[in-house]
Image (tube, helix red, strand yellow):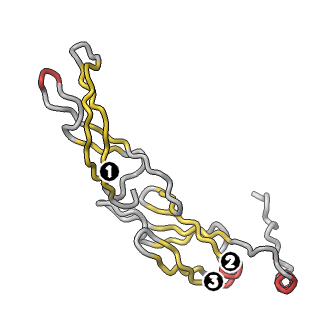
Amino acid sequence: TLTEHKRTISYNLPVYNAFGMIEQEIPKTLNVKIPAGVGNGQRIRLKGQGTPGENGGPNGDLWLVIHIAPHPLFDIVGQDLEIVVPVSPWEAALGAKVTVPTLKESILLTIPPGSQAGQRLRVKGKGLVSKKQTGDLYAVLKIVMPPKPDENTAALWQQLADAQSSFDPRKDWGKA
């Protein structure tokens, strides 16, 4: 989880007879604290909240399996977070400082000159926080073109194309 959560869960606790058949179900409700940093598929043990033991023995444990819903901005990769950051072609070419959200606040991310689409920029210590470690945030650059250019903008793009006529982005394409 990105942050600590408190959840109320309701479930029916089965009570088995001597033949292993469910004899009755007892409705139960628990307030559960899910710590920050718990990953998708991890389990949380709730000691003594399971089914009653045999012959009056102590209750067993209840295990919760955590399923994390996708976040609209962040992908979780272990303790790290990834966020896709849209940048303009001129921000990628010239470099820029752009505001990027993190879990707690927004930061100013430096885009180095000559950045490429798909490039990953690491922001140390801005990932998931757990008792054992703090992850990093990786900003993945996505270059976004402006809408169809008007006549003046098209002329500027053509000037750039003429100035960079020796550049071929596909020169090594398909070569091993």
In this rendering, the answer to whether 172 lies above or below 107 is above
In this rendering, the answer to whether 161 lies above or below 72 is below
Q: What residue does disc 2 label? A: 88
Q: Which amino acid does label 1 sit on?
A: Arg
In this rendering, the answer to whether 83 lies above or below 77 is below
Q: Residue visible at 12% across and 24% down?
A: 56
For the C terminus, the quadrant is bottom right
Q: Which amino acid does label 2 sit on?
A: Ser
Q: Residue visible at 60% across and 81% down?
A: 112
Can you tell which quarter of the image residue 153 is in? Answer: bottom right
Q: Answer with left or right where residue 49 lies relative to residue 174.
A: left
Q: Nearer the viewer, mark 3 or mark 2?
A: 2
Residue found farthest to the left: 56
Please give the label number shown on residue 168.
none
SS of the residue under disc 1: strand
Query: CB atoms at circles 2 and 1 under 8 Å apart?
Result: no
Could you tell which of marks 3 and 2 lies nearer the N-terminus? Answer: 2
Could you tell which of marks 3 and 1 lies nearer the N-terminus? Answer: 1
Q: Answer with left or right where residue 103 lies relative to residue 176.
A: left
Residue found farthest to the front: 27
Please give the label number shown on residue 7.
1
Q: What residue does disc 3 label? A: 95
**Residue 121, how many percent across, how many down?**
55, 72
Q: Residue visible at 31% across and 40% down?
A: 10
Q: Residue visible at 36% across and 53% down?
A: 38
Q: Which of marks 2 and 1 is in front?
A: 1
In this rendering, the answer to whether 3 lies above or below 117 is above
